[in-house]
Amino acid sequence: MNFEINKLLQDETIPFDFTLKNEDLKDIEGEIGEEGASVRGTIEKLSRGTFLVTVTTKMTMIYPCARCLEPTPVDCSYAYSETITVKEDEVILNLLPIVEECIYINEPYRILCSDDCAGLCPKCGNNLNHEQCSCDKNGDYDPRFEVLKNLL
Ligand SMILES: [Zn+2]
Ligand SMILES: [Zn+2]
Protein backbone atom coordinates (compact mmCIF):
# COMPACT_ATOMS: atom_id res chain seq x y z
CA MET A 1 0.00 0.00 0.00
CA ASN A 2 3.04 2.26 0.04
CA PHE A 3 4.12 3.66 -3.30
CA GLU A 4 7.25 5.46 -4.28
CA ILE A 5 6.16 8.71 -5.87
CA ASN A 6 9.32 10.80 -6.02
CA LYS A 7 10.46 9.31 -9.33
CA LEU A 8 7.14 9.79 -11.04
CA LEU A 9 7.23 12.18 -13.98
CA GLN A 10 4.65 14.81 -14.79
CA ASP A 11 1.47 13.21 -16.21
CA GLU A 12 2.91 9.76 -15.55
CA THR A 13 0.58 7.19 -14.04
CA ILE A 14 1.34 4.15 -11.92
CA PRO A 15 -1.29 1.46 -11.57
CA PHE A 16 -1.81 -0.47 -8.35
CA ASP A 17 -3.62 -3.66 -7.51
CA PHE A 18 -3.55 -5.24 -4.06
CA THR A 19 -5.72 -6.93 -1.49
CA LEU A 20 -6.52 -5.61 1.98
CA LYS A 21 -7.82 -7.55 4.94
CA ASN A 22 -10.30 -6.30 7.46
CA GLU A 23 -7.59 -5.82 10.09
CA ASP A 24 -5.74 -3.39 7.76
CA LEU A 25 -8.61 -0.90 7.84
CA LYS A 26 -9.86 0.98 10.85
CA ASP A 27 -11.97 3.98 9.88
CA ILE A 28 -14.83 2.12 8.23
CA GLU A 29 -18.24 1.09 9.53
CA GLY A 30 -18.65 -2.40 8.11
CA GLU A 31 -16.38 -5.40 8.23
CA ILE A 32 -14.59 -6.79 5.17
CA GLY A 33 -15.38 -10.44 4.44
CA GLU A 34 -12.73 -13.17 4.67
CA GLU A 35 -11.53 -12.92 1.06
CA GLY A 36 -10.49 -9.32 1.72
CA ALA A 37 -10.97 -6.27 -0.45
CA SER A 38 -9.57 -6.08 -3.95
CA VAL A 39 -8.15 -2.58 -4.43
CA ARG A 40 -7.25 -1.24 -7.89
CA GLY A 41 -6.49 2.13 -9.28
CA THR A 42 -3.88 4.61 -10.42
CA ILE A 43 -1.67 7.35 -9.06
CA GLU A 44 -1.13 10.16 -11.54
CA LYS A 45 1.28 13.00 -11.09
CA LEU A 46 -0.51 16.26 -11.93
CA SER A 47 2.25 18.62 -10.96
CA ARG A 48 5.04 18.90 -8.43
CA GLY A 49 3.75 17.51 -5.14
CA THR A 50 0.22 16.98 -6.46
CA PHE A 51 -1.16 13.58 -7.34
CA LEU A 52 -4.54 12.31 -8.44
CA VAL A 53 -5.40 8.95 -6.88
CA THR A 54 -8.26 7.00 -8.40
CA VAL A 55 -9.37 3.89 -6.57
CA THR A 56 -11.97 1.14 -6.89
CA THR A 57 -12.55 -1.41 -4.14
CA LYS A 58 -14.51 -4.63 -4.59
CA MET A 59 -15.37 -6.87 -1.66
CA THR A 60 -18.01 -8.51 0.42
CA MET A 61 -18.82 -6.19 3.30
CA ILE A 62 -20.60 -7.36 6.41
CA TYR A 63 -23.02 -4.88 7.93
CA PRO A 64 -25.42 -5.35 10.82
CA CYS A 65 -29.06 -5.45 9.71
CA ALA A 66 -30.72 -2.17 10.71
CA ARG A 67 -33.67 -4.01 12.21
CA CYS A 68 -32.36 -7.23 13.76
CA LEU A 69 -28.59 -6.51 13.92
CA GLU A 70 -27.80 -9.87 12.27
CA PRO A 71 -24.48 -9.65 10.32
CA THR A 72 -25.48 -9.31 6.67
CA PRO A 73 -23.02 -9.80 3.78
CA VAL A 74 -23.31 -7.33 0.89
CA ASP A 75 -21.35 -7.39 -2.38
CA CYS A 76 -19.89 -3.92 -2.78
CA SER A 77 -17.99 -2.04 -5.43
CA TYR A 78 -16.93 1.44 -4.35
CA ALA A 79 -15.14 4.10 -6.38
CA TYR A 80 -13.38 7.25 -5.26
CA SER A 81 -10.78 9.72 -6.40
CA GLU A 82 -8.86 12.36 -4.54
CA THR A 83 -6.20 14.93 -5.31
CA ILE A 84 -3.36 14.60 -2.83
CA THR A 85 -0.80 17.25 -2.07
CA VAL A 86 2.44 16.15 -0.47
CA LYS A 87 5.60 17.89 0.65
CA GLU A 88 8.19 18.12 -2.07
CA ASP A 89 10.61 15.74 -0.37
CA GLU A 90 7.93 13.13 0.29
CA VAL A 91 9.00 9.80 -1.21
CA ILE A 92 6.28 7.38 -0.19
CA LEU A 93 2.54 7.71 -0.63
CA ASN A 94 0.51 5.51 1.71
CA LEU A 95 -2.77 4.60 0.05
CA LEU A 96 -4.41 3.17 3.16
CA PRO A 97 -6.19 6.39 4.27
CA ILE A 98 -7.46 6.88 0.71
CA VAL A 99 -8.85 3.34 0.58
CA GLU A 100 -10.51 3.89 3.97
CA GLU A 101 -12.07 7.11 2.70
CA CYS A 102 -13.25 5.31 -0.45
CA ILE A 103 -15.09 2.70 1.60
CA TYR A 104 -16.30 5.05 4.33
CA ILE A 105 -18.00 7.63 2.09
CA ASN A 106 -19.69 4.95 -0.03
CA GLU A 107 -21.03 2.88 2.82
CA PRO A 108 -24.80 2.34 2.75
CA TYR A 109 -26.79 4.18 5.37
CA ARG A 110 -29.05 1.24 6.12
CA ILE A 111 -28.81 -2.47 5.34
CA LEU A 112 -31.60 -4.98 5.88
CA CYS A 113 -30.94 -8.74 6.02
CA SER A 114 -34.13 -9.11 3.96
CA ASP A 115 -36.89 -6.70 2.94
CA ASP A 116 -39.33 -8.42 5.26
CA CYS A 117 -37.00 -8.68 8.25
CA ALA A 118 -39.21 -8.80 11.35
CA GLY A 119 -36.61 -7.13 13.54
CA LEU A 120 -36.18 -7.43 17.27
CA CYS A 121 -38.92 -7.51 19.87
CA PRO A 122 -38.97 -4.01 21.42
CA LYS A 123 -39.59 -5.52 24.82
CA CYS A 124 -37.23 -8.46 25.24
CA GLY A 125 -34.85 -8.07 22.29
CA ASN A 126 -35.71 -11.48 20.83
CA ASN A 127 -34.94 -11.84 17.10
CA LEU A 128 -38.43 -12.24 15.62
CA ASN A 129 -37.06 -13.79 12.40
CA HIS A 130 -36.06 -16.87 14.36
CA GLU A 131 -38.78 -17.26 16.94
CA GLN A 132 -41.77 -15.51 18.38
CA CYS A 133 -41.74 -14.45 21.99
CA SER A 134 -44.80 -14.10 24.16
CA CYS A 135 -44.48 -10.34 24.67
CA ASP A 136 -47.46 -8.13 23.94
CA LYS A 137 -46.09 -6.13 20.98
CA ASN A 138 -48.96 -3.65 21.04
CA GLY A 139 -48.97 -3.00 24.77
CA ASP A 140 -47.34 -0.06 26.44
CA TYR A 141 -43.72 -0.47 27.15
CA ASP A 142 -41.40 1.43 29.35
CA PRO A 143 -41.16 4.96 27.89
CA ARG A 144 -37.48 5.00 28.77
CA PHE A 145 -37.01 2.43 25.99
CA GLU A 146 -38.64 4.84 23.54
CA VAL A 147 -35.95 7.37 24.31
CA LEU A 148 -33.29 4.73 23.68
CA LYS A 149 -34.93 3.72 20.41
CA ASN A 150 -34.83 7.29 19.18
CA LEU A 151 -31.13 7.42 19.88
CA LEU A 152 -30.43 4.31 17.79
ZN1 LIG B 1 -32.73 -8.30 9.86
ZN1 LIG C 1 -40.32 -10.26 23.26
Image: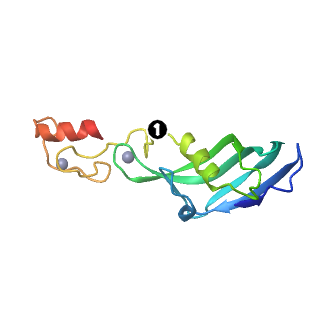
Front-most of residues 84 and 35: 84
Q: Residue at x 11, y 36 (%)?
A: 139
Identified by mark 1, the residue type is Tyr
Left or right side of 3 for 146 = left
Q: Residue at x 10, y 40 (%)?
A: 142
Looking at the image, what colour scheme do you see? rainbow
Front-most of residues 123 and 91: 91
As displayed, is residue 143 above or below residue 132? above
Q: How many numbered circles are shown? A: 1
Where is residue 118, by image quadrant? top left
Q: Quadrant of the C terminus?
A: top left
Where residue 117 appears, x then y in whole percent? 37, 42
Q: Element under label 1? A: loop
Q: Which residue is mark 1?
A: 109
Left or right side of 58 for 11 = right
Where residue 42 appears, x then y in whole percent? 78, 48
Where residue 5 appears, x then y in whole percent? 80, 55
In the image, the residue with mark 1 has its CB under 8 Å from the nearest atom of ligand 1: no
Q: Residue at x 18, y 50 (%)?
A: 124
Q: Quadrant of the N terminus?
A: bottom right
Front-most of residues 134 and 43: 43
Q: Residues within 10 Å of mark 1 (few under 14, many from 20)?
A: few
Left or right side of 146 for 2 = right
Where is residue 51, by image quadrant? top right
Front-most of residues 138 and 142: 142
Q: Residue at x 26, y 35 (%)?
A: 150
